[in-house]
Amino acid sequence: MGEQRIKIETEFIRLDALLKFAGAVETGGEAKLAIQGGEVKVNGAPCAMRGKKLRPGDRAELSGLTLVVE
């Protein structure tokens, strides 16, 4: 699916909120299931922490979509 850059105005964004904000998932519940199911990678490593704080420079991957936090 490619790469999408997400500009944040705060210090960090939670992983579940990032997936929802970017449109990678429809709902918070869908984000929770994807994260807990091991479908999401953060900076190249699998991540099961829904509340993981992502800061500018971090990358999240789901289903071929890479989200880069700026």
Image: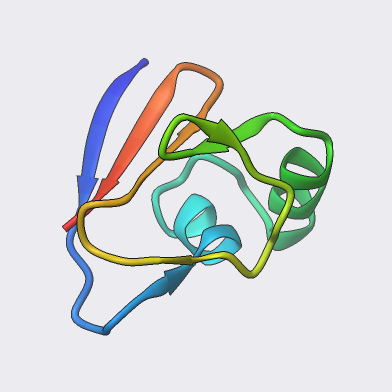
Q: Is residue 54 left or right of residue 20?
A: left
Seen at 41% across and 71% down, the residue is: 13
- Tell whether 68 sits left or right of 26: left
Q: Which quadrant is the N terminus positioned in?
A: top left
Tell me what residue is drawn at x 59 percent, y 43 percent.
25
Q: Is residue 64 above or below residue 33?
A: above
Residue found farthest to the bottom? 10
Above-or-below relation of 39 to 42: above
Q: Nearer the viewer, residue 7 or 47?
A: 47
In the rendered image, residue 24, in percent from the top left (x then y), is placed at 50, 39
x, y percent for residue 61: 47, 32
Q: Nearer the viewer, residue 66 or 57?
A: 57
Quarter of the figure with residue 11: bottom left
Q: Residue at x 41, y 39 (%)?
A: 43
Q: Residue at x 62, y 48 (%)?
A: 26
- Residue 44 x/y as whole percent: 45, 30
Quadrant including the C terminus? bottom left
Q: Position of residue 55 (x, y in %)?
A: 31, 66
